[in-house]
Amino acid sequence: MSQSLDRALTVLTALAEGPRTLDQLAESAGVHKTTVLRLLRTLEAHRFVQRADARHYRLGATLFDLASRALDQRDVRRQAEPALRALNDATGHTVHLASYESGEVVYIDKYESKHPVRMYSRIGKRAALHCTAVAKVLVAAFDEPRRREIAESITYTPMTENTITNAADYLAELRTVAERGYAIDDSEHEDFIHCVAAPIRDQAGAVLAAVSVSVPKILLDRPGLLALVPDLLAAADTASRACGWNPVGKD
Amino acid sequence: MSQSLDRALTVLTALAEGPRTLDQLAESAGVHKTTVLRLLRTLEAHRFVQRADARHYRLGATLFDLASRALDQRDVRRQAEPALRALNDATGHTVHLASYESGEVVYIDKYESKHPVRMYSRIGKRAALHCTAVAKVLVAAFDEPRRREIAESITYTPMTENTITNAADYLAELRTVAERGYAIDDSEHEDFIHCVAAPIRDQAGAVLAAVSVSVPKILLDRPGLLALVPDLLAAADTASRACGWNPVGKD
DNA sequence: TGCCAAGTTGCACTACTTGCAACGCCTAGT
DNA sequence: ACTAGGCGTTGCAAGTAGTGCAACTTGGCA
């Protein structure tokens, strides 16, 4: 569609890996280095990239600026913050906020674990649809035809021996999640971590986002994890109220 | 330099304000809406923007992803994290990490105050050079000619009645900061807030970044603020060591 | 049902982008 | 100190890709 823009975005994505030289960028984008140089100049003028040293470019401050402003605008994130922070303080474990956006589940906020064992995740990262608790919660919020559609579009990459690997099992799991009101990731994504997640709703009762608590198995066994569910649901409830949700008279 | 890219970046920046329609974006960029439409399509393909609803576009997940990855790559940030978190825990006040990058001072990390009174700032935001403690620390790290050059390029917008409004006073202040080892913002930026800041150094002794503690005056008077300096310096010291700094044999 | 506003598409024209080749700077090695 | 190699940078000519116009489609509202 727009070639130069397309290439510039490719360059930016390549820079996400770390500082790069002109030649490296030219090669990874598959274009002449002159082209990359000029794109970089424009990007630099807008402060999307900056020179790390004489021959290395890296991502610039505008990116941080845009991202944090955009994040601030996501109402859920701002409204849910106190409840999630409290949940993080109370449990000491990693708390994630994720939302479903045009076909994918994205982490939009994260509160780090107080324990030395941390998990790898990042705001902006995409969560796998078939093996994360947040994704299950978000997909379970759709009606059956939509769920089926999504379930059939997934490639069920096995991550651990507990990973769900077919659409039928996934749909069954979604039904359980919808009924139970929360989802479990029983080490389906990573061997040493399990999670629980619950939905955050707006005034119409629609699911805006999902909160999750992720715990290394060495810290808490399955009953221990499940013992966190009341706290999780309470936090999700508080966050939902902050988003305008009112349980009275809603199903 | 690169027109279409230039326009696309302008569009992205406009989107930072919040979700926009095609026409709004076309107007703010000063181009035909057809053009904007095609740029948006490319941006959408790379997930730099996404459709919020039928007629609104907003920033997309790739931006969050890039920004947080770029932030992770800033070594200072990662290395300094424990020390800054501890400082934030110990004092309960807002802690900022800022760095000097191609002519401007940018906040690259922030730890929120535990008190209800919060200050407005954001990761990625630029800090004014003449009236913030972090900027003073970072500029004071340069040699005299460079300082002078910077001092003369600043527009000394008065923010409060304490704001430094000319280059001579600014240069004098920088000398004080360099000698004393920390900087004070005596409500020079906002009436109700004052701050102290200190440098974080690498193995060569070069200043990589600045830490600051910002406190509302209603919580702590000036002696109270200055009483935080030892904690601040200790945190900066710890962070510096994490960055490879070793005070032995260095000035 | 019909109007209005907003998004979308086809097309022709031109300006912008592109890659090449040559240049200059900086670094490292002898 | 000199030289060679690598990398970033610039001028130029060719042509493609981006642009704006105008007409069409879609969706919401009275």
Image: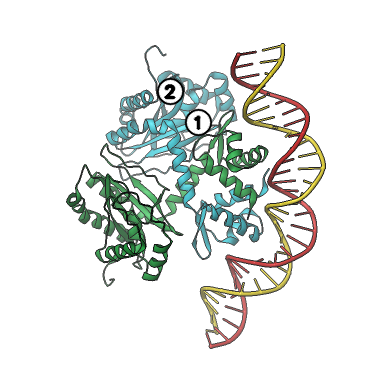
Chain colours: A cyan, B green, C yellow, D red
Q: Position of residue A129 (x, y in %)?
A: 51, 32
Q: Which chain is indicated by disc 2?
A: A
- The residue pinned by badge 2 equals A202
- The residue pinned by badge 1 equals A100
Asked if residue B158 is positioned above or below residue A186 in the image, the reply reads below
Total marks shown come to: 2
Quadrant including the N terminus of chain B:
bottom right
Report the front residue among B219 and B151: B151
**Mark 1 element type:** strand
Q: Which chain is indicated by disc 1?
A: A
Residue B11 shown left or right of residue B224 in the figure: right
Report the front residue among A162 and A176: A176
Give the residue drawn at x 36%, y 63%: B167
Of badges 1 and 2, nearer the viewer stands 2
Report the front residue among A31 and A147: A31
Residue A231 shown left or right of residue D17 in the figure: left
Give the residue drawn at x 63%, y 40%: B36
